[in-house]
Amino acid sequence: RPDGQEQKQLTLNSATNDAATVTPDGHYIVFISNRAGAFQVWRMQMDGSDPVPLTSGSGKNFPAISPDGKWVLYNTTDDWQLWRISIDGGEPARLSDSYALFPSISPDGKMIACLGRSDSKAVLRILSFADGRPLKTFDLATPTFSSNRIQWTRDGKAVIYGTERDGVTSIFRQ
């Protein structure tokens, strides 16, 4: 409730359940859990019922949902590449062939902002949602990426992220 009363625990197991995100229509919660061993991407109803694993195999992390609610992006934890899978499950498709961490999908669903690497340094990459093709690469404002989140502005014209320099973390807009 708005006043904080009647909170309800949605995951009732001894595993780690984290990185929850909600589909735009409010139908599902997508999250990661290690309840079956390695961290995987799971989907459940808003009331916590009907948990379903969307992925399997080696570890997965950092789920993001497309604005139309049809797709889930995530990272593999063995090589930090970017993958896409239907919200209903099925066969995943690789979107990157290199490091592409913390995916964030633009409001129009056409681009993905993510953390990448170039010449051993962190960069901000903008990829095509359709096929993962790189569209732009930006050097970060400071040498160290310190956030675990990249967020598009509502109008889709910029992304917001945090970086660190000399022990101070600042928020930047690109």
Image: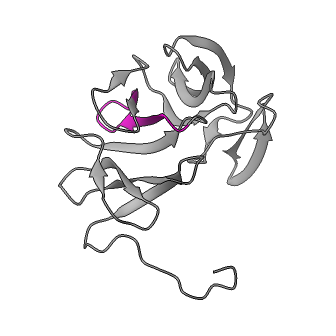
Q: Is residue 29 left or right of residue 147?
A: left
The figure's colour scheme reads one colour
Q: Is residue 82 magenta?
A: yes
Q: Quadrant of residue 87?
A: top left
Q: Position of residue 78 (x, y in %)?
A: 28, 35
Q: Is residue 29 visible?
A: yes
Q: Is residue 75 magenta?
A: yes
Vertical placement of residue 8 versus 49, above or below: below
Q: Which residues are magenta?
A: 69-84
Which corner quadrant holds the C terminus?
top right
Q: Nearer the viewer, residue 25 or 141?
A: 25
Vertical placement of residue 29 versus 152, above or below: below
Q: Position of residue 98 (x, y in %)?
A: 42, 20
Which corner quadrant holds the N terminus?
bottom right
Vertical placement of residue 36 versus 110, above or below: below
Vertical placement of residue 118 versus 41, above or below: above
Tell me how many marks there are: 0
Q: Nearer the viewer, residue 108 or 40?
A: 108
Q: Is residue 125 visible?
A: no
Q: Position of residue 43 (x, y in %)?
A: 37, 51
Point 27% across, 26% down: residue: 91
Point 45% across, 44% down: residue: 62
Q: Is residue 174 left or right of residue 148?
A: right
Point 33% across, 42% down: residue: 60
Q: Position of residue 40 (x, y in %)?
A: 29, 47
Q: Is residue 94 left or right of residue 106?
A: left
Residue furthest bottom in the image = 5
